[in-house]
Image (spheres, grey):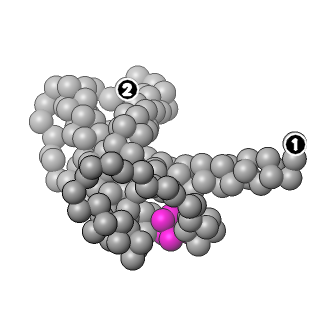
Amino acid sequence: MSESGEKKHAHRLTVRLVKFLDLVGMVALFAWIWLGYYQPHLLHPFYNQLAGNTAVIFVYTLIYYQLSHVYGSYLLHTSRISDLVYSQILSSFITNFLMFLIILLMNRHWLSLWAMLGLQALQSGLAIGWCLWAHNWYFRNNAPLSTVVIWDERPNIDKLINEYVEN
């Protein structure tokens, strides 16, 4: 592998690690709420608690991972911080809602929504902090790439170009 190939591989690996840190943080917060509040309140707990808890946390991880990719939560190189925060909060909200429904179906009895709302607040704070840190880290370590704008008959294109040149 050439030196530039090794450098690209190391860059991709580092970016994936940064994205993985966010996933671990979101899942760890859910696991904390699941194990601390929802799992002890189940009317019929799992026969094998380790396997059952692992399965619930794994399902949460899969749903959050898929939604965060669908909504572009990890597009550090092309998205603004506000877009990253919005997509992460939206992904966590939908995942938390789906998991709350799954928990209600498992329990067959109403459980308090307050723990899930607290989880959403914690995850929103984590999302904001991670997005600020990851975006700043990415652009501190990677120079912006040159771009070419090709247009034909779009009105006010000069205004749009000047707006992006200023940023």
- Position of 127 relative to 34 (above/below): below
> Which residue corresponds to the image point at 87% horizontal and 42% vertical from the top-left?
1
- Is 80 a magenta residue? no
Determine which of the numbered discs, if any, sits on residue 46 in the image. 2
Q: Quadrant of residue 43?
A: top left
Q: Position of residue 107 (x, y in %)?
A: 21, 29
Residue sitting farthest toward the left = 110
Question: In this view of the protein, which residue sits in the foreground, 37 or 127?
Answer: 127
Residue 24 in sight from this viewpoint: yes
Label 2 or label 1, whichever lies nearer to me, is 1
Q: How many marks?
A: 2
The disc, 2 or 1, on the residue closer to the chain's N-terminal end is 1
Where is 118 relative to 34, above or below? below
What is the magenta segment's predominant secondary structure?
helix
Kindly identify the amino acid type of the residue bearing the numbered disc 1: Met
Residue 153, percent across and down? 27, 49
Q: Secondary structure at mark 1?
A: loop
Which span is picked out in magenta? 133-137
Q: Residues within 10 Å of mark 1 (few under 14, many from 20)?
A: few
The image quadrant of residue 63 is top left
| Residue corresponding to mark 1 | 1
Q: Secondary structure at mark 2?
A: loop
Numbered mark located on residue 128 in the image: none
Q: Quadrant of the C terminus?
A: bottom left
Q: CA distance from mark 2 to mark 1?
A: 50 Å
What's the residue type where badge 2 is placed? Phe
What's the residue at 59%, 72% (across, down)? 140
